[in-house]
């Protein structure tokens, strides 16, 4: 984090005036949020899991839900809800992202319910349809999200009263947007 802060200070001293966007998996400490709060304008945290079994299995992330909930709560405290300009471009605030996973819509409902309970239905959300399976993935992550699964997640979101929701087209889940992780990279000193 300290390196990021130094780089941002240098860039701002050199005239950078664009909003700083911090895209994160949501699994960070409140202390880290506090270190970044005077440098970040727009937070894009993922809120991946409610069910700890999924967090353990897919991300090896102990206490994922509690950690992400606290971090996102702090982001909202320091930056507020997403603030859009007249061109509908984000200027400041928080947009919570949630990737709907195959066979895990039950967990999506729980994540959305937690967001509603802790942050309210005026929270900006991006309900992502872009899960792309990898060839060697384990079930259920070895397949694409079905249309029915994503529609179920969208309906749950709308039924809970969320109105500031970005919804994705199924075309966002193509290999064209996925880096090729199969190539070996050699690093030379």
Image (cartoon, rainbow, N blue to C red):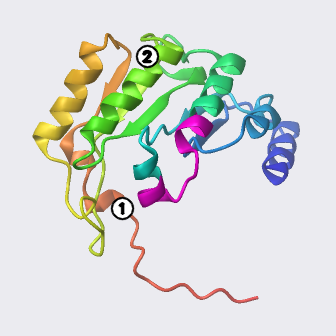
Q: Residue at x 50, y 27 (%)?
A: 95
How many callouts does the rendering have? 2
Q: Secondary structure at mark 1?
A: loop
Q: Is residue 101 above or below residue 112?
A: below
Badges 1 and 2: C-beta atoms under 8 Å apart? no
- Give the main secondary structure of the magenta stretch: helix
Q: Left or right: where does residue 115 sit relative to residue 139?
A: right
- Sequence-wise, the earlier of marks 1 and 2 is 2
The tag on residue 178 is 1
Picture quadrant where residue 180 is located: bottom left
Q: Position of residue 169 (x, y in %)?
A: 22, 38
Q: Residue at x 12, y 41 (%)?
A: 147
Q: Position of residue 26 (x, y in %)?
A: 57, 41
Q: Position of residue 32 (x, y in %)?
A: 76, 40
Picture quadrant where residue 186 is located: bottom right
Closer to the camera in the image, 146 or 83: 146
Look at the image and tell me in which quarter the C terminus lies.
bottom right
Q: Left or right: where does residue 21 sit relative to residue 35?
A: left
Q: Position of residue 52 (x, y in %)?
A: 46, 46
Q: Nearer the viewer, mark 1 or mark 2?
A: 2
Q: Is residue 90 above or below residue 11?
A: above
Within-10-Å neighbours for mark 1: few <14, some 14–19, many 20+: few
The tag on residue 80 is none
Determine the CA span between mark 1 and mark 2.
Answer: 31 Å
Residue where numbered disc 2 is placed: 116
Q: Left or right: where does residue 146 sit relative to residue 77?
A: left
Residues rendered magenta in the picture: 56-68
> Does 40 lie within the magenta span?
no
Picture quadrant where residue 93 is located: top right
Q: Secondary structure at mark 2?
A: helix
Closer to the camera in the image, 26 or 82: 26
């Amino acid at each position: 984090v300290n390196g990021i802060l130094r780089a941002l200070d240098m860039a701002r001293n050199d005239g950078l005036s664009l909003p700083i966007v911090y895209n994160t998996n949501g699994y960070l400490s409140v202390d880290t949020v506090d270190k970044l709060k005077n440098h970040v304008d727009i937070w894009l945290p993922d809120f991946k899991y409610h069910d700890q079994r999924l967090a353990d299995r897919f991300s090896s992330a102990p206490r994922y839900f509690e950690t992400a909930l606290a971090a996102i709560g702090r982001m909202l405290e320091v930056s507020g809800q997403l603030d859009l300009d007249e061109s509908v471009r984000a200027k400041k605030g928080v947009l919570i992202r949630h990737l709907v996973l195959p066979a895990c819509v039950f967990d999506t409902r729980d994540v959305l319910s937690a967001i509603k309970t802790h942050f309210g239905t005026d929270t900006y959300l991006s309900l992502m349809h872009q899960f792309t399976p990898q060839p060697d993935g384990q079930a259920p992550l070895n397949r694409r999200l079905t249309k029915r699964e994503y529609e179920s997640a969208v309906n749950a979101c709308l039924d809970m009263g969320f109105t500031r929701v970005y919804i994705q087209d199924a075309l966002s889940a193509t290999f064209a947007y996925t880096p090729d992780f199969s190539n070996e990279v050699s690093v030379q000193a």
